[in-house]
Amino acid sequence: MSFEDWYRQDRLPHIYCAGCGNGTVVNCTLAAVEQVAWKKEDTVFVSGIGCSSRAPGYIVTDSLHTTHGRAIAFATGVKMANPDLHVVVITGDGDLAAIGGNHFIHACRRNIDLTVVCMNNQIYGMTGGQGSPTTPLGCLSTTTPYGCAESPFDLCDLAIAAGANYVSRWTSYHVKELEKAVLAGLQTPGFSFIEALVQCPTAFGRRNKFKVVADQVEYLRAHSMLKAKHDRLLEQGEPVPKDMFIVGELMRRNRPALGVKP
Amino acid sequence: MTRTEFWQGNTACAEGALAAGCRFFGGYPITPSTEIAEHMAVKLPKKGGVFIQMEDEIASMASIIGASWTGARAMTATSGPGFSLMMENIGYAAMTETPCVVVNIQRGGPSTGQPTMGAQGDMMQCRFGSHGDYSVIALCPASVQEMYELTARAFNLADKYRVPVFLMADEVVGHMREKIIIPDSVEQVPRKALVKGTLPFKADSDGIPGFPQFGKGYGVHVTGLTHDERGYPCATNPKLHEMLVMRLVDKIESARHEIADFDIINPDAELVFIAYGAPVRTVQQVMHDHPHDNIGFLRIRTVWPFPEFALGEFKNARHFLVPEMNLGQIAREIERHMKVPVTSLPKLGGELHTPAELLAALEAYR
Amino acid sequence: MKLVIDETRCKGCNLCTKVCPYKIFKEGKKANRKGIIVPELDRPERCPNCRLMHLYGRTICGVCQLTCPDQAIHWVEEQPYEPKKVAIEY
C-alpha cells in the first residue's frame, strides 16, 4: 500500500506543467494520508480554484472542487454536517489569502477540525502568472511588470495569529519533512495549516530569472532556514538574512476545536 | 394531532424546515430574516442538527452545499444584500445539482435599501442572478401558514430535482404574526440514491441522476467546471457543455406541470388579478369585499418555473392586472406569454397595495 | 526490485536528478517519441530501495518517487530470468 493507490490512475498523467511543485506536494499529502490510515470512504478532499485545486480531481476519494476562495467554507459545511468524515482542504496562495482570506481567518479562529495544505507558488499560475498576495517585493508577474510594489503576506503568521492549532511550513524540496508535517496536521484535532512553498517554473520561474526547474528548487532549498536556527540567531542577536523562509513546525497548541467528535 | 399556534412568519418557516427534516443551517444575520437563524440556533441542536453562523453570506451558501453533499437537508436564510452575495455559489449548486433551500425574505432595495420594509424586488434575480443558463424553483408564500407548508415542500422539491429551491417571501409575511394550524407530520420524500456502479452524473430517464452521498464509498468528484458523466472536468468540449446545460434546464422546465402550484378563482372573469406573495392578501380583501363583481384571480405559489399554462385557464380574460411590490418583474414574464394586455401595478416603498388602489385599477380597465 | 521511469508520464523536469542522495539519475541525452528527454539511470542497482525493500518490508529513501511531480517513478520486481544487477560493497 503506498500513496499511489490514492490516485485515480485513469486520469493520470495530470495537467500540471513539467516540474510543477504541486505534483510533489500532492504526493506528500497522499503519503501522509496513507500513513494515518484513514479509509478512502471516510476521506473528503475539498479545493478551490487554481492549479493546486485541480489536485482532488486526481484523488480517488469523494472530492469537492468549489468556487474560488471558498474551499474552507464548503469544507466547514461538510465537516460540521458529518464529523465522522476526514476533511482535507487543498488550496493555493491566491485562493486562500486573496479571495479566501476571510474564510481562512475565521476557520483558524473557530479552530474547525480541518487540515489545509496550501501550495504557495507566490503567483496565480492557472490564469497565466498574475501577482498574488504572496508574491515577494520586486518580483515580476504579468500584473506587476515593474516589480511587485506590495509587501507579501506571511500566511503562517496569519494562521498563528488567528488561532490555528498546528502551523508548519516546508518547501517542495523537503519532501520527507513535508510528509511528516502533513501527517502531524492530520493527527492534530483543530485547524491544521501546512504551507508548502512550491516552484512554478512556467509562470513565476520563467519571469523571475529561473531558467531551469532545478534552479528554482535550489533557491527554495538555499533560502529555507529552520525555525530552530532562526530562533537561535534571534537569541544571539545575530542579523537574520533577508528573503529567508522559516521552515519547520511553527505552532502547535491545544485551543478548543470545533467539529471534533467527543 | 394538529395544533393551532400564533406565530411569526419567520418562526413558521423555521418550524416548517425542522418538520421537513432540515438538519443543517448555515447562515448570517440580516434583517428581516434573522429570526429564522435565531430560531434554528435554538431548535436545531435539540433535534441533532447543526447550526453554524458563518462569517458572511458567501460562506453560508458554501457551507450548506458542503453539508448537503454529506446527505443532510440544509438551508440558509437571507435577504436582498446577502442574496446578491450568494449568487456565485447558487450557480455552483445549480451546476453540481446540489439540493438546498435558500430563504429570501425580500426587503426594499436596491443596496441596503429598506431593511424593515417589504418588497418583491428579487424575483428576476432568483431566476437569472447567477451567470450562465440554469433553471431553479421558487416558491412564494402569502401567509404564515404558507411559510410553514411551502418551506416543507421546498425540501422535497430540492431533493427530487437536485436543484437549489428558493422561498421568496417578503418582510411583510416574514414579520407578521398570524394563526397557523400545524399538521402532525410533514411528508418527506428523500433523495434518490445513486445505484453503485453507475456513473455519478449519468441522468436517469427523468433527467436527474442519483445522489452520490459523501462517505458512502462512491468516490465522486464534484466540480463546478463543465463535467462529463463521470464527474471529471471536460471544459473544452462544446457538445458536452451543451448537453449538460440543456439537461440542467430541461429537468426543471419539463417538470413545470408537476412543480406548479396555483389557485384559479373565477376562471370566466374578464378582468383578472395575478398575484404572488404579500399582494395576494390585498387581492383577497378586494375579492372578499366585492364577491359579485366577477373578478378573476390567479394566485401563484410557484413563480419559477413560471406556470404559463395557468394563464390559459382564463378563457374570457380581457385584461390582466399584476400587483407587485416591484416595478413589474413578473408582469414582464406574463406579458411575453399573452396577447391580452397585461398591466403591472407596481408598489414601491414597503407598504402593501391598499384595496382602494386595486379597485381604482379595476375601474380604470373595466 | 528495479527502478523504472514511466515514460508515458515523465515530463523531463529532471527534479529526480537533483534530489537523489545517491546520484542515480543523470540528465538524458535523447528525446523520446513524445519529445521529452527522460533522465537516464546511472547504475540504478545502488538505489537502497531496490536492494533493501524486501529486507525491511517498507520503502527505504523513496525521495525520488515523492518528489516526482508526475508520479513517473516506480519500483517493480524483475521478471524471472531477467538479469539482476547487484552492487558489491567492499
Image (cartoon, grey):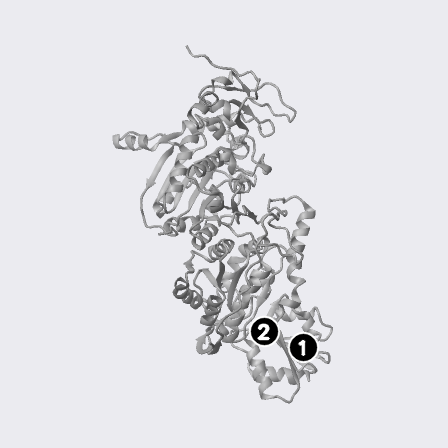
In the displayed orientation, state which residue is furthest to the bottom.
Answer: B292
Labels 1 and 2: the sequence-earlier one: 2
Label 2 sits on a secondary structure element that is loop
Task: Read off the residue under disc 2.
Answer: B276
Residue drawn 56% across and 80% down?
B282
Front residue (pair C22, A49): C22
In the displayed orientation, state which residue is furthest to the front.
Answer: C80
Which amino acid, by three-letter code, is at mark 1?
Answer: Phe
* Residue B320 marker: 1
Quarter of the figure that contains the C terminus of chain B:
bottom right
Residue drawn 47% across and 19% down?
C23
Chain for numbered disc 2: B
Query: How would you rate the neighbour count of disc 1 (Cα within 10 Å): few for under 14, some for 14-19, many for 20 or more?
Result: many
In the displayed orientation, state which residue is furthest to the left.
Answer: A236
- Residue A57's place in the image compared with C27, above or below, is below
CB within 8 Å, label 1 to label 2: no
